[in-house]
Image (tube, rainbow, N blue to C red):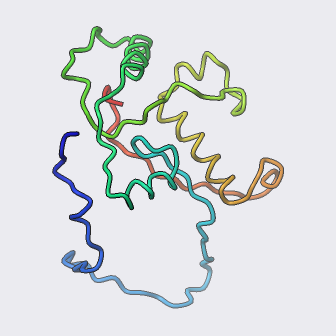
């Protein structure tokens, strides 16, 4: 396994210094604001399928750094072919990293999306839909319990996507 410039051992949250130069003032009991509760979470990181597996990987001081699999290379080629990219892709474009092991499986019917539309979707969009739904399930909600209710999903996503997904 290649070593990275980032090691888990370098992370120490015990001695965080505030060198930002930003002064944050806390306000108490601001009228008109309501509290927000994070009640469900989901995510896929590198070779892990969920946050529990990711946490276990961290506890074991492992890194998910690996070369991309042949299956993912074929999927990338097919995806880029559909998007009109110049093919073939040179070997050096397939970089090592913390790639998800699989991105092709997607239950398009569950999300009321046609197969044709699902095939043309950015893989990040499919993964977002899956993990957003998993976060709702993690919070204990089903489609019936959220129907006709005000429910919000707040999400974050990596922005370093490109031909290296």
Q: Residue 104: where, in percent of width, then height?
A: 52, 24
Q: Residue furthest front?
A: 60
Q: Residue at x 28, y 79 (%)?
A: 14
| Left or right, 62 with reference to 36 | left
Q: Residue 150: where, in percent of width, then height?
A: 73, 58
Q: Is residue 43 above or below residue 130?
A: below
Q: Residue at x 29, y 41 (%)?
A: 65
Pick the quarter of the image with the N terminus: top left
Q: Residue at x 43, y 32 (%)?
A: 101
Q: Residue 126: where, in percent of width, then height?
A: 55, 33
For the residue pair 60 and 121, the one nearer the viewer reads as: 60
Q: Residue 63: where, in percent of width, then height?
A: 31, 49
| Left or right, 36 with reference to 21 | right
Quarter holding residue 61: bottom left
Q: Residue furthest bottom?
A: 28
Q: Is residue 118 above or below residue 153?
A: above
For the residue pair 78 and 91, the one nearer the viewer reads as: 91
Q: Is residue 19 above or below residue 92?
A: below
Pick the quarter of the image with the C terminus: top left
Quarter holding residue 85: top left
| Left or right, 17 with reference to 154 | left
Q: Residue at x 18, y 45 (%)?
A: 3
């Amino acid at each position: 396994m290649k070593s990275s410039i980032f090691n888990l051992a370098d992370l120490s949250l015990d001695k965080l210094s505030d060198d930002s130069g930003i002064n944050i003032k806390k306000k108490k009991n601001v009228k008109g604001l309501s509290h927000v509760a994070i009640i469900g979470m989901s995510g896929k990181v590198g070779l892990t399928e969920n946050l529990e597996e990711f946490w276990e990987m961290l506890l074991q001081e492992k890194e998910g750094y690996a070369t991309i699999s042949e299956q993912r290379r074929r999927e990338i080629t097919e995806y880029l072919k559909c998007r009109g990219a110049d093919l073939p892709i040179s070997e050096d474009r397939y970089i090592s990293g913390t790639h998800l092991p699989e991105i092709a499986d997607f239950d398009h019917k569950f999300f009321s999306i046609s197969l044709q539309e699902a095939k043309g979707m950015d893989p990040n969009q499919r993964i977002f839909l899956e993990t957003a739904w998993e976060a709702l399930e993690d919070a204990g909600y089903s489609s019936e319990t959220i129907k006709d209710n005000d429910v919000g999903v707040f999400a974050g996503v990596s922005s370093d996507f490109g031909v290296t997904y």
